[in-house]
Image: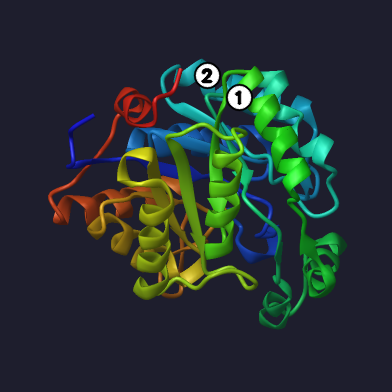
Amino acid sequence: MNKPNKRIVTCAITGSIHTPTMSPYLPITPQEIAENAIDAAKAGASVIHIHARNPENGAPSPDLNLFREIIERIREKDEDVIICTTTGGGIGMTVEQRVAVVPEFTPELASLNAGSINWGLFPLIGKIESFKYPWEEQMLNATKNFIFSNTFESIGEMVKIMYENGTKPELEVYDVGHLYNIAFLVNAGILKTPVYLQFVTGILGGIGSTPYDIMNLQATADRLFGKKNYQWSVIGAGKSEFTATTTGLVLGGNVRVGMEDNLYLDKGVLAKSNAELVEKMVRIMNELSLEPATPDEAREILGLK
Protein backbone atom coordinates (compact mmCIF):
# COMPACT_ATOMS: atom_id res chain seq x y z
CA MET A 1 0.00 0.00 0.00
CA ASN A 2 1.71 3.19 -1.19
CA LYS A 3 0.13 5.77 1.09
CA PRO A 4 3.05 7.04 3.18
CA ASN A 5 0.92 9.68 4.90
CA LYS A 6 -1.32 6.99 6.42
CA ARG A 7 -0.27 5.48 9.75
CA ILE A 8 -1.92 2.88 11.95
CA VAL A 9 -2.99 4.04 15.41
CA THR A 10 -3.44 1.20 17.89
CA CYS A 11 -5.13 1.85 21.22
CA ALA A 12 -4.33 -0.48 24.14
CA ILE A 13 -7.34 -0.07 26.39
CA THR A 14 -6.45 -1.39 29.84
CA GLY A 15 -3.53 -3.83 29.88
CA SER A 16 -2.32 -5.60 33.01
CA ILE A 17 0.27 -3.15 34.38
CA HIS A 18 -1.70 -0.26 35.82
CA THR A 19 -3.94 -0.82 38.81
CA PRO A 20 -7.25 0.74 39.88
CA THR A 21 -5.58 2.87 42.57
CA MET A 22 -3.46 4.63 39.93
CA SER A 23 -6.43 6.15 38.09
CA PRO A 24 -10.18 6.26 38.68
CA TYR A 25 -10.58 6.33 34.89
CA LEU A 26 -8.86 3.00 34.19
CA PRO A 27 -11.49 0.80 32.49
CA ILE A 28 -12.18 -2.31 34.53
CA THR A 29 -15.51 -3.92 33.63
CA PRO A 30 -16.27 -5.41 30.21
CA GLN A 31 -18.70 -2.55 29.59
CA GLU A 32 -16.08 0.10 30.47
CA ILE A 33 -13.41 -1.59 28.35
CA ALA A 34 -15.76 -1.93 25.38
CA GLU A 35 -17.01 1.66 25.64
CA ASN A 36 -13.43 2.93 25.78
CA ALA A 37 -12.58 0.81 22.75
CA ILE A 38 -15.54 2.08 20.72
CA ASP A 39 -14.76 5.71 21.55
CA ALA A 40 -11.06 5.20 20.75
CA ALA A 41 -12.01 3.84 17.34
CA LYS A 42 -14.22 6.87 16.71
CA ALA A 43 -11.26 9.09 17.65
CA GLY A 44 -9.04 7.49 15.01
CA ALA A 45 -7.71 4.15 16.25
CA SER A 46 -7.93 1.42 13.62
CA VAL A 47 -6.68 -1.32 15.97
CA ILE A 48 -7.93 -2.02 19.50
CA HIS A 49 -5.70 -4.08 21.81
CA ILE A 50 -7.71 -6.01 24.39
CA HIS A 51 -6.99 -7.35 27.88
CA ALA A 52 -9.67 -8.43 30.36
CA ARG A 53 -9.95 -7.65 34.06
CA ASN A 54 -11.89 -9.05 36.98
CA PRO A 55 -14.82 -6.60 37.18
CA GLU A 56 -14.93 -6.86 40.98
CA ASN A 57 -11.36 -5.81 41.79
CA GLY A 58 -9.67 -4.87 38.51
CA ALA A 59 -7.12 -7.69 38.56
CA PRO A 60 -5.94 -8.94 35.12
CA SER A 61 -7.95 -11.99 34.09
CA PRO A 62 -7.69 -14.76 31.45
CA ASP A 63 -11.45 -15.48 31.72
CA LEU A 64 -12.69 -16.14 28.19
CA ASN A 65 -16.23 -15.14 29.16
CA LEU A 66 -14.97 -11.65 30.00
CA PHE A 67 -13.13 -11.43 26.67
CA ARG A 68 -16.30 -12.64 24.91
CA GLU A 69 -18.42 -9.93 26.52
CA ILE A 70 -15.87 -7.24 25.64
CA ILE A 71 -15.60 -8.34 22.01
CA GLU A 72 -19.35 -8.74 21.57
CA ARG A 73 -20.00 -5.29 23.03
CA ILE A 74 -17.44 -3.75 20.66
CA ARG A 75 -18.88 -5.55 17.65
CA GLU A 76 -22.42 -4.43 18.51
CA LYS A 77 -21.33 -0.83 17.90
CA ASP A 78 -18.34 -1.20 15.57
CA GLU A 79 -18.08 -4.05 13.07
CA ASP A 80 -15.02 -2.61 11.33
CA VAL A 81 -12.30 -1.87 13.90
CA ILE A 82 -9.49 -4.44 14.08
CA ILE A 83 -9.36 -6.33 17.36
CA CYS A 84 -5.95 -7.43 18.64
CA THR A 85 -6.20 -9.75 21.62
CA THR A 86 -3.39 -10.10 24.12
CA THR A 87 -1.41 -13.30 24.61
CA GLY A 88 0.82 -11.53 27.13
CA GLY A 89 -1.86 -11.84 29.79
CA GLY A 90 -0.69 -11.01 33.29
CA ILE A 91 1.66 -12.19 36.03
CA GLY A 92 0.99 -15.78 37.03
CA MET A 93 -0.94 -16.80 33.91
CA THR A 94 0.17 -19.94 32.09
CA VAL A 95 1.03 -20.02 28.39
CA GLU A 96 -2.14 -22.02 27.80
CA GLN A 97 -4.26 -19.37 29.52
CA ARG A 98 -2.53 -16.58 27.60
CA VAL A 99 -3.05 -18.07 24.13
CA ALA A 100 -6.57 -19.47 24.67
CA VAL A 101 -8.17 -16.29 23.28
CA VAL A 102 -6.84 -17.04 19.78
CA PRO A 103 -8.67 -20.31 18.93
CA GLU A 104 -11.70 -19.08 20.86
CA PHE A 105 -12.15 -15.78 18.99
CA THR A 106 -9.88 -16.03 15.88
CA PRO A 107 -8.90 -12.34 16.00
CA GLU A 108 -7.24 -10.66 13.04
CA LEU A 109 -4.28 -9.72 15.24
CA ALA A 110 -2.87 -11.03 18.51
CA SER A 111 0.14 -9.85 20.45
CA LEU A 112 3.07 -12.26 20.64
CA ASN A 113 5.99 -11.43 22.92
CA ALA A 114 9.29 -12.05 21.15
CA GLY A 115 11.44 -12.96 24.14
CA SER A 116 11.86 -13.05 27.90
CA ILE A 117 12.79 -10.04 30.04
CA ASN A 118 13.02 -8.95 33.64
CA TRP A 119 9.80 -7.00 34.16
CA GLY A 120 10.08 -4.40 36.90
CA LEU A 121 6.98 -2.55 38.05
CA PHE A 122 7.99 -2.36 41.72
CA PRO A 123 9.24 1.28 41.59
CA LEU A 124 5.58 2.31 41.28
CA ILE A 125 4.96 1.20 44.87
CA GLY A 126 6.80 4.19 46.30
CA LYS A 127 4.51 6.59 44.45
CA ILE A 128 1.30 5.29 46.07
CA GLU A 129 0.37 5.89 49.73
CA SER A 130 -2.31 3.20 49.98
CA PHE A 131 -3.88 0.72 47.59
CA LYS A 132 -7.55 0.11 46.96
CA TYR A 133 -7.10 -3.69 46.67
CA PRO A 134 -4.48 -5.96 48.30
CA TRP A 135 -3.54 -7.65 45.00
CA GLU A 136 -2.18 -4.38 43.57
CA GLU A 137 0.80 -3.98 45.92
CA GLN A 138 1.37 -7.74 45.94
CA MET A 139 1.57 -7.85 42.15
CA LEU A 140 3.87 -4.84 41.88
CA ASN A 141 6.17 -6.12 44.62
CA ALA A 142 6.36 -9.56 42.98
CA THR A 143 8.04 -8.03 39.92
CA LYS A 144 11.28 -7.60 41.91
CA ASN A 145 11.81 -11.31 41.29
CA PHE A 146 9.80 -11.82 38.10
CA ILE A 147 10.94 -12.90 34.66
CA PHE A 148 8.36 -12.45 31.90
CA SER A 149 9.00 -15.80 30.27
CA ASN A 150 8.62 -16.20 26.52
CA THR A 151 10.73 -19.17 25.45
CA PHE A 152 11.39 -20.29 21.90
CA GLU A 153 9.15 -23.30 22.54
CA SER A 154 6.22 -21.23 23.81
CA ILE A 155 6.63 -18.66 21.02
CA GLY A 156 6.63 -21.45 18.44
CA GLU A 157 3.49 -22.98 19.95
CA MET A 158 1.70 -19.64 19.89
CA VAL A 159 2.74 -18.92 16.29
CA LYS A 160 1.37 -22.30 15.21
CA ILE A 161 -1.96 -21.66 16.94
CA MET A 162 -2.21 -18.17 15.43
CA TYR A 163 -1.55 -19.34 11.88
CA GLU A 164 -4.03 -22.20 12.26
CA ASN A 165 -6.69 -19.63 13.19
CA GLY A 166 -5.89 -16.99 10.56
CA THR A 167 -4.41 -14.60 13.14
CA LYS A 168 -1.39 -12.45 12.35
CA PRO A 169 1.15 -12.19 15.19
CA GLU A 170 1.90 -8.68 16.39
CA LEU A 171 5.43 -9.27 17.66
CA GLU A 172 6.19 -7.33 20.85
CA VAL A 173 9.87 -6.31 20.83
CA TYR A 174 11.19 -5.17 24.23
CA ASP A 175 14.86 -5.13 23.29
CA VAL A 176 17.22 -5.52 20.35
CA GLY A 177 17.84 -9.19 21.10
CA HIS A 178 14.18 -9.91 20.47
CA LEU A 179 14.68 -8.86 16.84
CA TYR A 180 17.34 -11.55 16.53
CA ASN A 181 14.91 -14.05 18.06
CA ILE A 182 12.39 -13.13 15.37
CA ALA A 183 15.03 -13.40 12.63
CA PHE A 184 15.87 -16.91 13.86
CA LEU A 185 12.19 -17.89 13.78
CA VAL A 186 11.83 -16.48 10.25
CA ASN A 187 14.92 -18.33 9.02
CA ALA A 188 13.65 -21.52 10.67
CA GLY A 189 10.36 -21.21 8.75
CA ILE A 190 8.31 -20.76 11.92
CA LEU A 191 7.37 -17.12 11.27
CA LYS A 192 6.28 -15.82 7.87
CA THR A 193 7.26 -12.47 6.41
CA PRO A 194 6.29 -9.71 6.29
CA VAL A 195 6.32 -9.61 10.09
CA TYR A 196 4.63 -6.92 12.16
CA LEU A 197 6.84 -5.54 14.93
CA GLN A 198 5.66 -3.55 17.92
CA PHE A 199 8.63 -1.79 19.57
CA VAL A 200 7.79 -1.65 23.28
CA THR A 201 10.06 0.93 24.91
CA GLY A 202 10.47 2.27 28.42
CA ILE A 203 9.73 -0.88 30.47
CA LEU A 204 12.20 -1.49 33.32
CA GLY A 205 14.06 -4.56 32.06
CA GLY A 206 13.83 -3.61 28.38
CA ILE A 207 15.13 -0.95 26.01
CA GLY A 208 14.66 2.75 26.71
CA SER A 209 12.43 5.23 24.88
CA THR A 210 15.02 7.71 23.60
CA PRO A 211 15.26 8.49 19.87
CA TYR A 212 18.58 6.61 19.88
CA ASP A 213 16.88 3.45 21.16
CA ILE A 214 14.08 3.63 18.61
CA MET A 215 16.50 4.33 15.74
CA ASN A 216 18.60 1.38 16.90
CA LEU A 217 15.57 -0.91 16.78
CA GLN A 218 14.59 0.31 13.32
CA ALA A 219 18.13 0.05 11.93
CA THR A 220 18.49 -3.48 13.30
CA ALA A 221 15.15 -4.51 11.79
CA ASP A 222 16.23 -3.06 8.44
CA ARG A 223 19.42 -5.16 8.50
CA LEU A 224 17.73 -8.36 9.62
CA PHE A 225 14.57 -8.30 7.51
CA GLY A 226 14.90 -5.68 4.77
CA LYS A 227 12.46 -2.79 4.55
CA LYS A 228 9.89 -4.76 2.52
CA ASN A 229 9.68 -7.67 4.94
CA TYR A 230 8.33 -5.92 8.01
CA GLN A 231 5.98 -3.24 9.29
CA TRP A 232 6.55 -1.61 12.65
CA SER A 233 4.92 0.44 15.35
CA VAL A 234 6.22 2.00 18.57
CA ILE A 235 5.04 2.27 22.18
CA GLY A 236 6.48 4.57 24.83
CA ALA A 237 5.66 3.53 28.39
CA GLY A 238 4.52 6.18 30.85
CA LYS A 239 5.67 9.75 30.32
CA SER A 240 7.52 8.68 27.16
CA GLU A 241 4.31 7.79 25.30
CA PHE A 242 4.02 10.82 23.05
CA THR A 243 7.72 11.55 22.59
CA ALA A 244 8.40 7.94 21.55
CA THR A 245 5.39 7.74 19.24
CA THR A 246 6.24 11.08 17.63
CA THR A 247 9.77 9.79 17.00
CA GLY A 248 8.22 6.72 15.44
CA LEU A 249 6.06 8.81 13.13
CA VAL A 250 9.05 10.86 11.97
CA LEU A 251 10.96 7.66 11.22
CA GLY A 252 8.08 6.23 9.21
CA GLY A 253 6.45 3.94 11.75
CA ASN A 254 3.00 3.36 13.16
CA VAL A 255 2.02 4.11 16.78
CA ARG A 256 0.26 2.77 19.86
CA VAL A 257 -1.24 4.75 22.72
CA GLY A 258 -3.68 3.90 25.49
CA MET A 259 -4.11 3.37 29.21
CA GLU A 260 -2.22 0.07 29.09
CA ASP A 261 0.92 2.12 28.42
CA ASN A 262 0.23 5.52 29.99
CA LEU A 263 -2.45 7.05 32.22
CA TYR A 264 -1.66 10.73 31.64
CA LEU A 265 -2.81 13.12 28.95
CA ASP A 266 -0.26 15.72 30.02
CA LYS A 267 2.06 16.26 32.97
CA GLY A 268 -0.06 15.78 36.10
CA VAL A 269 -3.28 15.46 34.10
CA LEU A 270 -4.91 12.03 34.09
CA ALA A 271 -6.58 10.97 30.86
CA LYS A 272 -10.29 10.50 31.46
CA SER A 273 -10.60 8.06 28.57
CA ASN A 274 -8.58 6.22 25.98
CA ALA A 275 -10.23 8.38 23.33
CA GLU A 276 -8.47 11.44 24.78
CA LEU A 277 -5.10 9.76 24.25
CA VAL A 278 -6.00 8.83 20.67
CA GLU A 279 -7.24 12.35 19.96
CA LYS A 280 -3.93 13.81 21.16
CA MET A 281 -2.02 11.33 18.99
CA VAL A 282 -4.10 12.29 15.95
CA ARG A 283 -3.47 16.00 16.62
CA ILE A 284 0.28 15.33 16.62
CA MET A 285 -0.06 13.35 13.39
CA ASN A 286 -1.96 16.19 11.76
CA GLU A 287 0.85 18.61 12.65
CA LEU A 288 3.19 16.29 10.72
CA SER A 289 0.80 16.13 7.71
CA LEU A 290 -0.04 12.51 8.53
CA GLU A 291 -3.43 10.81 8.86
CA PRO A 292 -4.67 7.82 10.86
CA ALA A 293 -5.32 4.81 8.65
CA THR A 294 -8.86 3.48 8.53
CA PRO A 295 -9.35 -0.14 9.63
CA ASP A 296 -9.48 -1.29 5.99
CA GLU A 297 -6.33 0.69 5.16
CA ALA A 298 -4.65 -0.90 8.19
CA ARG A 299 -5.71 -4.34 6.92
CA GLU A 300 -4.11 -3.57 3.58
CA ILE A 301 -0.90 -2.28 5.20
CA LEU A 302 -0.58 -5.39 7.40
CA GLY A 303 -1.94 -7.93 4.92
CA LEU A 304 -4.70 -9.12 7.23
CA LYS A 305 -7.43 -11.56 6.33
Type of residue at label 1? Ile
Residue 93's spot in the image, x, y percent? 83, 46
Q: Nearer the viewer, residue 277 or 174?
A: 174
**Camera-side residue of 137 and 8:** 8
Please tell me whether mark 1 sits on a helix, a strand or a loop: helix
Q: How is the image coloured?
A: rainbow
Please indicate whether residue 150 sits to the left or right of residue 188 in the image.
right
Q: Secondary structure at mark 2?
A: helix
Q: Nearer the viewer, residue 114 or 236?
A: 114
Disc 1, disc 2: CB below 8 Å?
yes
The location of residue 271, given as percent across then percent down, is: 46, 58
Question: Which residue in the protein does label 1 denote?
Answer: 71
Q: Quadrant of the N terminus?
A: top left
Residue at image position (18%, 35%) is 3
**In this rendering, does residue 175 appear at all?**
no
Residue lying at 57% horizontally and 19% vertically, measured from the top left? 166
How many C-alpha atoms fall within 10 Å of the one at disc 2: few (<14), some, or many (≥20)?
some
Q: Callout 2, which amino acid?
A: Arg
Q: Circle 2 is placed at which residue position?
A: 75
Dividing the picture into quarters, in which one does residue 167 lie? top right
Disc 1 to disc 2, C-alpha distance: 6 Å
